[in-house]
Every structure is written in structure tokens, then in C-alpha cells.
Image: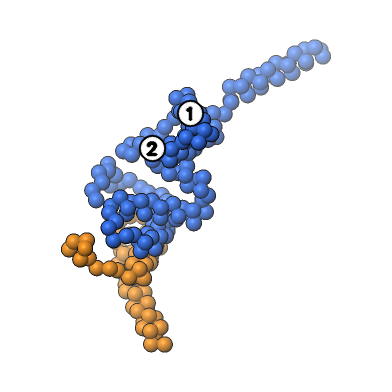
Amino acid sequence: MAIKRQPESEFAKIDEHALDWFRVFLKHLEIELIDSAGDLPAEAGSKDYALTALKAARRTLVESGLDHEQVLALFGRAAYAPIASKETRKWNSELNKRRFELIDKDIQGTISQTERLELADLTQLMRQHVDSDSNLPMQGAQRLHRHLLDLEAKSMDFDQ
Amino acid sequence: MSKFDSYRIEASAARALTEWKFFFSEQVTRKARELAAKDGPTSTISLQHYQQAAEFAADLLVSEVQKARSDYGDQKAA
């Protein structure tokens, strides 16, 4: 199995806690894989192995304490995130429109499995955007603050 | 060897290998952290620390496997 990846710098450093988490995750994933491998039919091929591996990853994540919705959102993010680059996606009106289309399909019962994963990804991205600092309504808060200061100043003028 | 004349592997053997790999990597990590701390106030664990730690962990792994073998032998004999 040959996978091309950008070589990391010799001096790149990795967070210790991340490596600890990956190590424990890999152990549990391997045990899940071994338990699942016994159910594979003799004629199974690489696509069956890949599906088994993804199912085992899902079970391992559930056993780590995540619920079904969280795991679905993570799978959606992994499926739609750019593979080669580390660029992060920004929420925009196109993605918002697409999310509403998918919600409509979900309500109508015509959403496919692939689209369900896409919806989970978009919902996660939207939540990140809503929770991000850049989305805080600072301009409105600053306008209100100025307005209140003006009111206070006018009130003091009036009292004098 | 084609897929059709390959060996079948006991699940317990595959699980044991997973446990040994995990044991080894845990010991390397723990020892490398100790070695880095001895080197002074640094926040970096280097390849050298890992190489020294791996030799130490390899000895521990041999003991661990031997202990598991004797435990298994005791269970079979009982």
C-alpha cells in the first residue's frame, strides 16, 4: 500500500499528548480489527478490509466516549477535508446554501448516505464558525458601549 | 505465497502481538521522558532519547513475553 505524503521536516515536533492518544487509540483499533477479521469471508478483498477498518475505527471512537452524532460529524469532516494540504475551510454562504439543501432532502427522506456524511461535515463546520471568536458580534457590542457612554455623558450634562 | 495457501493466525496470537507492541511503545515513551528530564530543562524528547529508551524497553519486552509464556504453561499444566 503506497501512500504519497509531504515529507515532514526533520525538525518538526509533535505534541506528546497527541502521540499518547494515538498510541492508545491504535492499540484499541488493532484489537477491534483482530476481532472483526474473524468475520471476514474467505473471498474478502481490499475493499472489504477497508470497510472493516473503518467500522473498527468507528467502534473504537464510540468506546472512547464519543456518541454516534459526534462520530458521524468526524467521519464527515475526514471525508470532505482536503487530503494533501493543511488548509482550513471557512464557512461561507455557498456552504450555508448547500447545508439547507441537504436538510431539505433529509426532511423529505431523499438524502443519500454520502449526502448524510456531507451534512454532518457542514453542520460541524457551521458550529465551529458560530462558536469562533471571529464570529462574536464585537462591532455591535462596541456600538452599544459607545451609545451607553454617550447617554451617560448627556445625562451628566443634563444634571449640571 | 498466494492468499489461498496462506496461514491462519490464532486471534489470541494477533492480540498478544498488539499488546507487546503497545507495551514496547509505552516503555520507550516512559523511559525517553525520564532520559530527557535527566538531560536538563528541555521540553524536547529527541531521537537519541528514543534510541536509548528502545534498548531498555526491548529487554523489558523479552521479560514480559517470557513471563506470559510461563503463565500460559502454568495454565495448560493446571
**Residue occupied by mark 1:** A101
**Chain ID for label 2?**
A
Disc 2 to disc 1, C-alpha distance? 20 Å
User: In this rendering, is residue A50 above or below A119?
Assistant: below
Q: Which of B27 and B74 is in front in this view?
A: B74
Q: Is residue A8 left or right of residue A63?
A: left
Amino acid at pointer 1:
Glu
In the image, the chain rendered in orange is B
Q: Which one is earlier in the sequence, the residue at label 2 or at label 1?
A: 2
The residue mark sitting in front, 2 or 1, is 1
The hue used for chain A is blue
Q: In which quarter of the image is residue A146?
A: top right
Q: In this view, does A16 lie to the left or right of A45?
A: right
Q: Is residue A40 left or right of residue A63?
A: left
* Label drawn at residue A81: 2
The quadrant of the picture occupied by the C terminus of chain A is: top right
